Every structure is written in C-alpha cells, then in structure tokens.
C-alpha cells in the first residue's frame, strides 16, 4: 500500500537529478548558515523557498511534455503582457522597474520568461520541424528579442542576459547555421570599436569598471577584491565550516546571495570547489543525457536549453566571484539565498524530469 | 515515400542535434576546467599571498572625502562653508578600559558632560572598530598637549576634520538647510540611488533646504588611497590613489540682507514670509519663524538642545513656508475677483448695497461681513480695497464652486509650486468631489459662500500664496519658483544658471487685471485696509490684507481679541507686489496669531520692500551679538532678537 503510493509519487521523478539537487540544496543550507552569521532565520526562510521549489518541480514533472507544449503560446503571451504591465505600472526599487504588484503579492515577470521564452521557441521549432529556413531563425530571433528588450529596459541586464542565453541555446540546438554563429561573432568583433567610439566618456568608464572592477575599489571593485581574498585564502582544504575569517569578520559583501560562493571557497577550499564543480557537472551531464534521449523535437530542444542555461548560471556566478568575469547580478543556482530563482530552478528541473519520464507516451503518440 | 523522407529527416535532425549537444558539452567542460584552473591559481599558486592578505587584511582602501561645496547668497555672502578643526577620536575596539582612558584624557583636554553624552550616543550607533569623536574643536594648545602624550593612548587619535559651518547662524536655516550625520534611512536611500560608494568616508549628509535638495551637487566625488597597512593598522605605503573632487558651489537667489531684515521684523512672533521676483521666479527671501541654529546639528545635536527645539510650542523645526497650511482669508479675494471678471459675472459698473450680511435664497442664516453695519454701495474695486465680505459671498455663489476653483487653480492654489527644495505640501482647494472622497458628504451651498472669502476648507502655504501673488503681479505668467540661482562647478568654475521655467500662461484680459490692481493699490492708500503700510513709501504697492480664523466663532458670538488665548487669535496675512506698475518683488507674509493682516503682517512686508526697492535698511540699534557656536541655547538667541524688536517699534 505504502510502497504503491511511493512508487506513484516518484513515478515521474528522475532519481539522479533529485539526488544531486537535494545534495546541492543541503550544501547551500550549510553555507547559508555560515554566511548569515549563524543565524537560523535566514536558513529556515531558505528551507521554505526550497520546499516550494521541490513541490513545483514535482507538479511539473507529472505534466507530460505535450501538455506543456500546449501552453507555450499562452505562457509566452502572458509573460510578455506582464512585462509590458511592469513597464507601465511596475514598482520602482533600486532605480529599476522590475516588480509588479498584483494585490496579494509582488511578482517579477522577467523571471517567468527564463522558462517561457525557451518553451515558446522550442514549440516554434517543433512545429516547423524539418523545413527550417533562414526565415525561421529570423522569426525565432524576433520572438526572443521582444521580452529581452523589455527586460533590458527595466533595466535588469543580468536577467536579460540569461533569457537571451536560454533562447539562444534553443536556436543553437535547432540547428542555426554555423555561418550565422561565426559571422555574428565576427560582426560584433568588428563593430565594437565603432560602437566604443560613439560612447560618452562616462559610459565608457562604466563599461571599463564592469570589465575591470579594481578601477572602482570603493564600489563594485571592493566586492571582487574581498571575494578573491576569501577564495584564495581558503587554500587547498579550506578554513573549515564557520571558520572563514573574511566571511565571519564582515569583509565579504552580499555573502548570502550573489557572493555566497566566496564563502564556500574560503571555508571548503580547493577540494570543496572541485567537488561542487563536479556536482554541477553531473547535473548538467544528466540534463544532456535527458536531451539526447528525448523523443520529440520540442523535448530535446527544451531539455538542451535548460541544461545549458543551468550551466550558464554556474559558470557566470563562479566566474564573477573568482574574478574572471565582470560583476553581473547572477546567483549561484541551488546555493544562493532567494525564493524566485529557487522556484525557477525547481520548475526547470521539473521540466527535465517530465521529458525524461514521459518518453514512452511520446513514442506511441 | 513521403514517410521515408520524413523519417530520414527525423533521424538526420536527431543526429545534428546530438552533434550540437556534444559541442555544448565540450564548451561546458572547457569553461568548467577554466574555473578549476582559476581556483587552482587562487587557492594553490597564490595561496600564500591571499593567506597573508586575509590574515592581516593588509590592503586597506582609505576613502578621501571631498570638500563640500559652499552655499552663497545672491550677492556672494557665505551661508555655508567648511573649516578644519582638530578632533579627538577614539576607536573603542582598540581600547581595553574605555572609562580609565577617558578619565586620563580628561586630565589633558576638557571633556564636558555634553561631549560625553554625544560620544556615548555615537558609540552606540557605530561599529566598535570605527573611530568616534569624543571631543571636537580642540584649540592649538589642546592639540599640542595631546600630541606630546600620544604614546600613552593607543586607540586614541588626533584627527583634522573638515567641518561644516554656517557663519550666519540662524539666518534662513529653513532655506539653506543643514547637514547632520548619515543615519540608517539615509544609508538605505543612498544604496537605492546607487551612490553609496561615493559616500565611503563621509559622515554627513544634507538635511532639509538646499543642503538636502542639492546634495548631489554639493557632495563632490570621493577619492581613495589603496594603502598597505602593518599589523597595527598603520599605513606603510600607498599603492594607488585618486584625488577627490570638491562639490560644486551653490549660489542662491536669496538676498541674505533681505532675509535678515525680514527675520528681525518678525521678532519673537511665529510665521513665515516668502518674497519672489515675479519675472524670474527667484525667491529673494524665505522666512520661517522661529528659526534655529543649524550649527547645532553638525556635530550630532545633544539631547538638551534637541529637546528644546523639538518640544518647543513654537515648533522651530517646522518649515512653515512649505509645510505650514493656513486659510488664505481675505488675501484670496483678488483671485476670486479676477475669476468673477474673467467669467463675465461682474462687469465693472456693477455694485451692491451692503447691509452687513449675505443670505442664501430661502435661508435665514446670515453670512456676516466683518463690518457689522455694512459698507453701503460697493463695486469691485472698492470691494477689494475695503475687503468687503458680502460682495465676495455673492460673487462666489454666482460663480459656483467649480468655476471658482478651476480658475484659481491656475494660480497654484491646492498644488505644489515645484520649488526646488523638498518637503512642500499642496494645501487644499476644496471641490465637491474632494469632499465626497474625503468625508463622504455632499457639498453645501454655504461652503461655496465662505470659499469666496478664503475661509472654509481652503488652505494655502505661504510659498503658494507668494507664488500666486507673483503670478498675479506677472499678469498671469506663472514662473517656477527657485531658491537656487546657479551651480558653480568646483573644477572648471563654469556657472550653470538654473533656467526660468514658465509653468503656466493664464489668459487674462488687461482691463480685468487693471481693476484688481487698482483695488489692491487702494488697499495701501488712505481708506484702504492697510493704509499705514503704504504711507510715505515713495513707490506704489498693490496689496491685500487677510485674517484667518484659528477657531470657529459661533453664529451669535462676537470675536473678542482680548478674551482669547494668544494661540487662538486669528492669523494675520498680507500679500503685496511693488512697484505696482512694474513689479520687482511679490511677497506673502503670515504672522501666526498676529490678529489683523494690515497691522501685524503689513509692516514686515514694508520693511522688506523698502530694502529691496530703495536699499533702505531699518535703523541699526543694539549690535546683534555674534553667537558663539555651537552651544548657545536657543532661548538666549531669541531674547536678544526680542529686545531689539521692542526698541525698534
């Protein structure tokens, strides 16, 4: 009876993914406890965020991909409408208009688009399936550009970048010609000096600081200086959990959110970092396996994009905290404190599981 | 056939997909390896370096705060500047026994009870590793004494800090504002505005007035030094640095002398005066009485002085010019008059027979004139001159509340004037919709009647009233009022003037304006309600007096000034512009509980106009004592002013 119930409960859960996600969440809670000055309130709030994400993951995992395909257009349209609503009536905080007050609670529609955009694009390509022409890629670029431009206008460059990435991966997996990709890279390379010469001095300065934060040691450079000291001083084995001096002595800013990786690196050292990289790599690899085995165009494009987007999160965050990428507001997935990004992750993993566990149905249909 | 192509396509597509997937996996592998190498570099290769950095946190970034910009009046009189003072600062975390250290310090330099109180307050507000001033304004001898004995006091430092000082003391504090220590709320705001890094090393921020509104200009850009420090936290060498950029200087439109004359004329009375140059919107005088000494706030105000200011019945901390709301009383009448003329409700020969009261049709309620016996035959011009209530009761009724408020709203009533300092309130111009929203009650006709004489729900700020008067003087062209004339770049010395913005151009007929002006000019001539104000002026003044009730008077009761508590007496109001034919100054004066506008508020306005138009200054008497700073109690200061005032009248 109980075993029957359990098997029904886990029928659509991918055990490899689930194990990795739970393990990463556990690590996240430990680091968060240390980063928040051993205060339990943050940790318990994060546990609620994680529970919500896990429930969302379970629900989505139980919905077959064909159903998800059906909501591609409505989800995309609602998302874009909400973004327009934000632009018109959104609440302003920290100088940007990102939140929409819908009476009961505030929502951040740009977060929704991180999944709605790749779903929409995967749907589009699956409809056009084997007759793709250059026009299709042009239309796909248009589908992606609308929400991205709206998000950039808020302005929220970090999210705009991630939405662009998630959409681009779909387009890439759908088979965008190499000529376009390499040509695009060449074009950007060729045009950037021209673009640079058109900028005002203060705009250039802002970009320079973004690329090399040490030029602004009182502002964003301070974060990087302190976080590299934290990671570097962790050494091979780390200073031990709750013993990171940079962390515990208040030197590290934003150490529960975007810079939480510095806390991890300081306390668990090189060995901890490598193990965390490995854990993330397993999650990404599992996503790739699911994508490779997927039976429909929609499923494989979506699974590929979700896996690559997760990879982007990991790489951009760790790269920025360790000082090899510019500082943009991207959290470390499953580890950083925050409810919205956790929920998006839960939904993403749910989609992967749904794709993996509904294959037989697809094959017959 | 078709099926097989599709199948082949399908397989083909899957093959392509897997190729791409492999490429993606390779990219992920390469970038993750790059991350791994980066970790290796940081944590193994350069471990020693970062380890030592973390151990002693050897690199310290020392911000260098910029000089705050100066604030000058329109003629270059300094209203706010900076000077260096020696301060003695203590870092609590570096001291084992704070009490004995303070006791030892007290043997060398005087540390008063007030100093100690402030120190304790600041200490509670800051981290233990931050240095907190225990004594400010040390003189040379005290500084030298400490320097010699410095070795005895680890954790105590003699610092030379730049202090803000307001050389004019209490003068125009509500316009200039003041600075005080950055608090939690300011910090949150700075973070939100994304300028927090520019405030590293800065302890103070503008509060109120120009200091607050032009904070960005005044503050400047913080410089920094990246220094290597030894284990004691002493800087060993400078690794890199960038010099700070001083804040920009601000030139006000305020005339400090005019401001001083106006404030002196108020004496101990409460109230407000705003004077504007009608053609440019420049605010010449911005008075809110009583005022207070901004220097008290620079160091962090002590408890006693704060209590004195905050709990005073006179509420000196409130900016009456922007936040004080008063019924405009009869000063509203010229605007109602113009509304009547422009709407064609009153053609010039029209006159009424005033029996001393007005009644609505089918009602016995009497709306009484201020003159119980009535004014006899009254036309528009005379109605303004003698401030005939009955005339305006009827006019308001005929206009109706909507037409009346729609018209006067153009003069800024019920709205913010958009002056360039913060905290302005919008006053109130009542309409039936407003009443429905606010009280869920219908509008009564009687309420329209009393709006005609500026009573009822109508509320204005002195700023609004001055703005409306300036707009009237400017024949309907409304200019945005501003208290700052120009910003002077500290580096380039380039002067950026604040532009004159036309907010509204009210379409008015010249002959109507002439009638209102004639009525207002007569106000200051023999027979008018403020004849004494115009006496021997040498220029013509268009003016209107007003009184605003503080408490309601019952239908059959008589208002008796003497029997009423001083704080329940009527407010005295006065608006004027001069010279009437080519207005150079427009102003509004409110004297709280002053009684009659003509006698209480009018003379203040006259002194201001005499100075501005003729350069005449009131006779100088007992020289105003230079107030020692910053411990002078407020009470002393006001007694000095009061003594002068008595002599003066």
Image: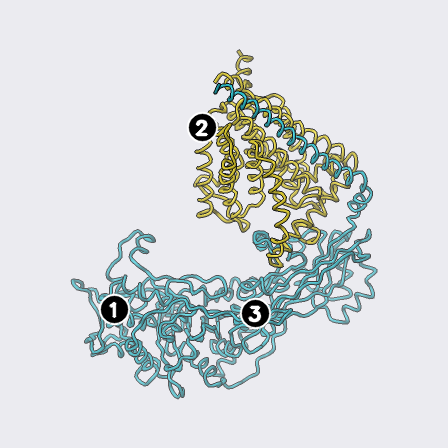
Chain colours: A yellow, B cyan
CA neighbours of label 1 inside 10 A, class few (<14), some (14 to 19), many (20+): some
Tell me the crowding category of disc 2: few under 14, some 14 to 19, or many 20 or more residues within 10 angstroms, Cα based: few
Q: Please state the horizontal and vertical placement of residue B486, each as a whole percent of the image.
A: 54, 71
B268 vs A241, nearest the viewer: A241
Q: Nearer the viewer, residue B307 or B390?
A: B390
Residue A289: where, in percent of width, then height?
62, 24
Name which quarter of the figure residue B206 lies in.
Answer: bottom right
As helix, strand or loop, the secondary structure at mark 3 comes to strand
Pointers 2 and 1 within a single chain: no
Q: Residue furthest left?
A: B362
Left or right, A22 with respect to B265, comes to right
Chain holding disc 2: A
Element on which disc 2 rests: helix
Residue under label 3: B487
Q: Is residue A294 above or below residue A148?
A: above
Q: Is residue B448 above or below residue A217?
A: below
Q: List the residue tagged with mark 2.
A: A70
- Of all chains, the one bearing label 3 is B
Against B567, residue B45 (above or below) is: above
Closer-to-camera residue (B29/A24): B29
Location of residue A267 in the rendering, given as x and y in whole percent from the top left corner: 74, 36
**Left or right side of B580 for A93:** right
Determine the CA span between mark 2 and mark 3.
Answer: 60 Å
Looking at the image, is mark 3 or mark 1 earlier in the sequence?
1
Does residue A339 appear in this view?
Answer: no
Q: Calculate the distance from the C-alpha at mark 3 to the C-alpha at mark 1.
A: 43 Å
Mark 2 and mark 3, same subunit?
Answer: no
Q: Which residue is mark 1?
A: B343
Which label sits in the foreground, 2 or 1?
Answer: 2
């Amino acid at each position: 009876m109980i075993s029957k119930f359990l098997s029904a409960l886990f029928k659509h859960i991918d055990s490899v993914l689930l194990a990795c996600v739970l393990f990463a969440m556990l690590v996240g809670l430990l680091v968060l406890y240390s980063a928040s000055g051993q205060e339990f309130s943050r940790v318990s709030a994060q546990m609620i965020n994680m529970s919500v994400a896990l429930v969302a993951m379970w629900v989505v995992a139980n919905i077959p991909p064909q159903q998800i395909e059906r909501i591609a257009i409505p989800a995309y349209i609602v998302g874009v409408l909400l973004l327009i609503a934000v632009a018109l009536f959104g609440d302003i905080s920290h100088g940007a208009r990102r939140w929409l007050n819908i009476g009961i609670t505030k929502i951040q529609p740009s977060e929704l688009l991180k999944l709605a955009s790749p779903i929409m694009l995967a749907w589009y390509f699956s409809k056009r399936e084997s007759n793709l022409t250059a026009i299709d890629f042009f239309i796909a670029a248009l589908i992606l550009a609308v929400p991205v431009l709206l998000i950039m206008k808020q302005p929220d460059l970090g999210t705009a970048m991630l939405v662009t990435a998630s959409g681009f991966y779909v387009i890439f997996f759908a088979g965008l010609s190499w000529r376009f990709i390499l040509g695009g890279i060449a074009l950007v390379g060729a045009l950037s000096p021209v673009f640079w010469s058109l900028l005002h001095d203060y705009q250039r300065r802002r970009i320079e600081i973004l690329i090399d934060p040490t030029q602004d040691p009182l502002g964003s450079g301070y974060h990087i200086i302190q976080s590299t000291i934290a990671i570097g001083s962790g050494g091979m084995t780390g200073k031990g959990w709750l013993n990171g001096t940079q962390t515990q002595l208040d030197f590290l800013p934003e150490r529960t959110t975007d810079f939480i990786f510095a806390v991890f690196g300081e306390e668990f050292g090189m060995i901890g970092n490598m193990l965390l990289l490995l854990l993330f790599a397993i999650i990404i690899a599992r996503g790739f396996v699911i994508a490779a085995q997927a039976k429909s165009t929609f499923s494989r494009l979506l699974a590929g994009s979700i896996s690559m987007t997760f990879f982007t999160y990991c790489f951009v965050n760790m790269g920025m905290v360790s000082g090899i990428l510019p500082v943009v507001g991207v959290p470390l997935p499953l580890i950083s404190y925050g409810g919205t990004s956790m929920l998006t992750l839960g939904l993403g993993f749910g989609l992967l599981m749904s794709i993996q566990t509904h294959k037989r149905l697809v094959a017959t249909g | 056939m078709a099926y097989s192509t599709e199948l082949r396509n399908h397989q083909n597509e899957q093959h392509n997909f897997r190729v791409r997937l492999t490429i993606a996996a390779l990219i992920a592998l390469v970038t993750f390896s790059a991350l791994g190498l980066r970790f290796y570099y940081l944590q193994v290769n350069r471990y020693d370096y970062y380890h030592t950095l973390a151990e002693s946190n050897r690199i310290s970034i020392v911000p260098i705060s910029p000089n705050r910009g100066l604030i000058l009046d329109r003629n270059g009189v300094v209203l706010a500047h900076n000077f260096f003072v020696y301060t003695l600062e203590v870092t609590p975390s570096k001291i084992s026994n704070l009490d004995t250290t303070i006791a030892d310090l007290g043997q060398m330099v005087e540390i008063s009870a007030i100093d100690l109180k402030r120190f304790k307050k600041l200490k509670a507000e800051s981290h233990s590793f931050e240095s907190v001033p225990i004594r400010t304004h040390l003189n040379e001898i005290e500084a030298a004494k400490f320097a010699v004995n410095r070795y005895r006091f680890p954790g105590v430092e003699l610092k030379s800090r730049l202090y803000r000082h307001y050389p004019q003391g209490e003068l125009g504090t509500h316009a200039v504002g003041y600075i005080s220590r950055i608090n939690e709320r300011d910090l949150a705001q700075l973070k939100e505005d994304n300028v927090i890094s520019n405030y590293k090393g800065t302890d103070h921020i503008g509060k109120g007035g120009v200091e607050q509104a032009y904070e960005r200009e005044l503050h400047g850009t913080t410089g920094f030094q990246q220094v290597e420090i030894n284990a004691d936290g002493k800087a060993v060498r400078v690794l890199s640095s960038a010099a700070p950029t001083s804040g920009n200087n601000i030139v006000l439109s305020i005339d400090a002398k005019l401001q001083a004359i106006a404030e002196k004329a108020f004496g101990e009375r409460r109230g407000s005066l705003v004077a504007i140059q009608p053609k440019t919107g420049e605010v010449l005088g911005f008075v809110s009485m009583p005022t207070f000494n901004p220097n008290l706030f620079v160091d962090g105000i002590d408890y006693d002085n704060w209590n004195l200011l905050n709990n005073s019945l006179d509420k000196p901390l409130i900016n009456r010019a922007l936040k004080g709301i008063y019924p405009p009383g009869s000063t509203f009448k010229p605007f109602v008059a113009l509304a009547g003329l422009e709407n064609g409700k009153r053609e010039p020969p029209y006159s009424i027979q005033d029996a001393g009261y007005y009644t609505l049709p089918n009602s016995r309620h009497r709306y009484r004139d201020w003159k119980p016996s009535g004014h006899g035959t009254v036309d528009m011009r005379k109605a303004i001159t003698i401030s005939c209530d009955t005339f305006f009761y009827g006019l308001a009724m005929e206009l109706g509340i909507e037409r009346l408020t729609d018209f006067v709203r153009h003069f800024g009533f019920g709205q913010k004037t958009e002056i360039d300092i913060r905290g302005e309130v919008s006053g109130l111009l009542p309409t039936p919709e407003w009443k429905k929203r606010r009280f869920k009650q219908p509008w009564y006709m009687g309420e329209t009647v009393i709006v005609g004489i500026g009573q009822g729900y109508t509320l204005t700020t002195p700023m609004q009233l001055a703005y409306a008067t300036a707009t009237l003087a400017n024949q309907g062209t409304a200019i945005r009022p501003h208290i700052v004339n120009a910003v002077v770049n500290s580096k380039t010395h380039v002067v950026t003037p604040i532009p004159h913005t036309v907010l509204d151009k009210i379409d008015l007929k010249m002959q109507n304006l002439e009638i209102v002006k004639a009525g207002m000019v007569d106000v200051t001539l023999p027979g008018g309600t403020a004849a004494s104000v115009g006496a021997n002026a040498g220029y013509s003044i268009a003016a209107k007096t007003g009184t605003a009730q503080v408490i309601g008077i019952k239908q059959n009761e008589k208002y008796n000034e003497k029997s009423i508590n001083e704080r329940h007496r009527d407010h005295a109001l006065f608006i004027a512009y001069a010279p009437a034919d080519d207005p150079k100054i427009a102003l509004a004066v409110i004297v709280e509980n002053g009684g009659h506008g003509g006698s209480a508020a009018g003379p203040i306005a006259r002194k201001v106009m005499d100075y501005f138009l003729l350069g005449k200054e009131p006779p100088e008497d007992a020289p105003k004592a230079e107030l020692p700073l910053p411990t002078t109690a407020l009470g002393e200061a006001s007694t000095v002013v009061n003594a002068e005032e008595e002599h003066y009248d």
